[in-house]
Image: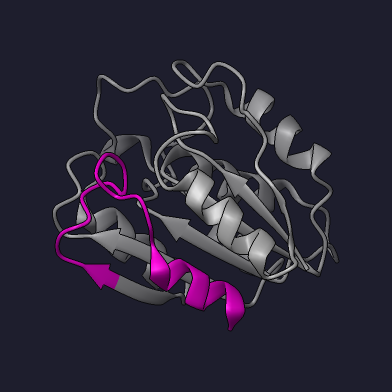
């Protein structure tokens, strides 16, 4: 099994809980790919999708996306050709796809659209979705997690005190449980 971690905006795979996660995955003898996504401070969707493509996800791949990395995963699934599938998708603190619901100071560069995500197209490429969201997320409203979970028919893990799963969150044991399921 292969795990692909797509980090969020303004960071890289050496920060937050990402190194801990990579180590835990390796301990379980699974492959992990965590590309360093280009221009994390001002990302463009096409560049991030190209990096995800390079990891060659398939039906034996679990995609894990944090924040903007989760948006990239959902946009990638929307564009996937018919018949291509991945094993599982886990979204952590992931934004809504709607440009109407994002902070107006955020850049868009293709991540968000007026119509939001095409959940039906996304679900045609995966049957197993999990959404992690904390009520005290200071960057992405809890409602975005609710919207994503509902649209994807996802298992929804709700937290009270993890913020945006950024600073101060060094481990997410529940994430390992979802990988092992």
Quadrant position of the C terminus in the picture: bottom right
Residue 144 falls left or right of residue 126? left
Residue 137 falls left or right of residue 3? left
Residue at 25% across, 19% down: 105
Task: Answer whether residue 19 is visible to the viewer in this image.
Answer: yes
The location of residue 147, given as percent across then percent down, is 33, 62
- The answer to which of 136 and 20 lies nearer the viewer is 20
Magenta segment range?
A: 158-181
Quadrant position of the N terminus in the picture: bottom right
**Residue 164, magenta (yes or no):** yes
Residue at 29% across, 65% down: 146
The location of residue 151, given as percent across then percent down, is 44, 67
- Residue closest to the far bottom: 181
In the rendered view, would you say 167 is above or below 77? above
Residue 127 falls left or right of residue 137? right
Task: Answer whether residue 70 is visible to the viewer in this image.
Answer: no
Report how many numbered discs are placed on residues in the image.
0
- The image quarter containing residue 88 is bottom right
- The answer to which of 124 and 93 lies nearer the viewer is 93
Residue 19 falls left or right of residue 17? right
**Residue 44, magenta (yes or no):** no
Residue at 78% across, 66% down: 85
- The image quarter containing residue 59 is bottom right
- The image quarter containing residue 149 is bottom left
The location of residue 20, given as percent across then percent down, is 49, 52
In the rendered view, would you say 62 is above or below 115? below
Asked which colour scheme the image uses, the reply is one colour
Residue at 36% across, 74% down: 156
The location of residue 123, given as percent across then percent down, is 62, 68
């Amino acid at each position: 099994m292969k795990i692909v971690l797509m980090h969020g905006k303004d960071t890289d795979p050496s920060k937050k809980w990402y190194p801990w996660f990579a180590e835990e995955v390796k301990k379980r003898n699974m492959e992990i790919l965590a590309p360093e996504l280009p221009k994390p401070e001002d990302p463009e969707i096409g560049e991030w999708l190209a990096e995800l493509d390079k990891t060659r996800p398939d039906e034996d791949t679990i995609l894990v996306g944090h924040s903007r990395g989760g948006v990239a995963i959902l946009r990638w699934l929307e564009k996937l050709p018919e018949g291509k599938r991945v094993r599982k998708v886990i979204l952590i603190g992931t934004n809504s796809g709607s440009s109407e619901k994002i902070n107006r100071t955020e850049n868009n560069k293709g991540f968000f659209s007026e119509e939001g995500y095409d959940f039906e197209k996304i679900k045609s490429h995966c049957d197993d979705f999990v959404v992690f969201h904390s009520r005290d997320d200071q960057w992405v409203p809890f409602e975005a997690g609710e919207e994503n979970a509902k649209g994807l028919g996802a298992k929804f893990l709700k937290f009270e005190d993890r913020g945006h799963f950024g600073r101060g969150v060094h481990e997410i044991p529940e994430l390992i449980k979802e990988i092992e399921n």
